[in-house]
């Protein structure tokens, strides 16, 4: 009953939650900054922030930002139909 009734109804919710959790952890800044003491252990977001302090050219910063944006955009593209399905079925009663 769970697989045939409940799981199809909560699939958009689980997909949305998965994308939000991914975004939350991908954009996390403070915890990796505290834990990663060496330069080799820096995450992408903390690395881009450290590049801003070192007077790196703007095109290098923008290239790093695009690289950081691509996984987020891919996660959205994968979960887009679930977002739309969740919004479309929100107002339906019955």
Image: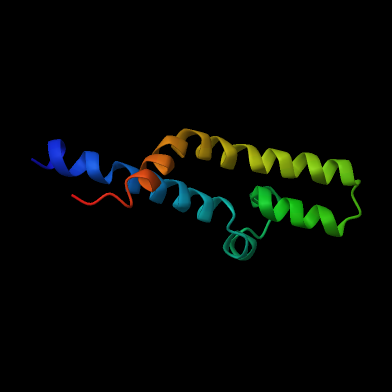
Q: Which residue is drawn at 64% across and 62% down?
A: 33
Q: Nearer the viewer, residue 30 or 21?
A: 21
**Residue 84 horizontal/vertical position (percent):** 42, 41
Front-lying residue, 13 or 45: 13
| Rendered residue at 13%/36% (across/down) | 4
| Vertical comparison of 93 with 74: above or below | below
Residue 62 sits in quarter: top right
> In what quadrant of the picture does the N terminus appear?
top left
- Residue 71 on image: x %, y %: 58, 38
**Colour pattern of the rendering:** rainbow
Q: Name the one closer to the observer, 60 or 54.
A: 60
In percent of width and height, residue 12 lies at: 34, 43
In the image, what residue occupies the spot 52% across and 34% down? 77
Q: Position of residue 65 (x, y in %)?
A: 73, 45
Foreground residue, 68 or 8?
Answer: 8
Give the answer, above or below, for where 35 lies relative to 73: below
Instruction: From the viewer's perspective, tell me whether residue 35 is left or right of residue 89.
Output: right
């Amino acid at each position: 009953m769970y697989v045939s009734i409940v799981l199809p109804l909560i699939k958009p919710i689980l997909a949305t939650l998965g994308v939000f959790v991914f975004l939350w952890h991908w954009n996390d800044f403070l915890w990796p900054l505290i834990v990663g003491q060496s330069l080799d252990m820096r995450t992408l977001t903390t690395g881009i922030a450290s590049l801003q302090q070192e007077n790196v050219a703007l095109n290098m910063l923008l290239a790093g930002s695009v690289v950081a944006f691509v996984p987020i955009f891919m996660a959205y593209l994968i979960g887009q139909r679930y977002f739309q399905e969740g919004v479309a079925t929100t107002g339906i009663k019955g």
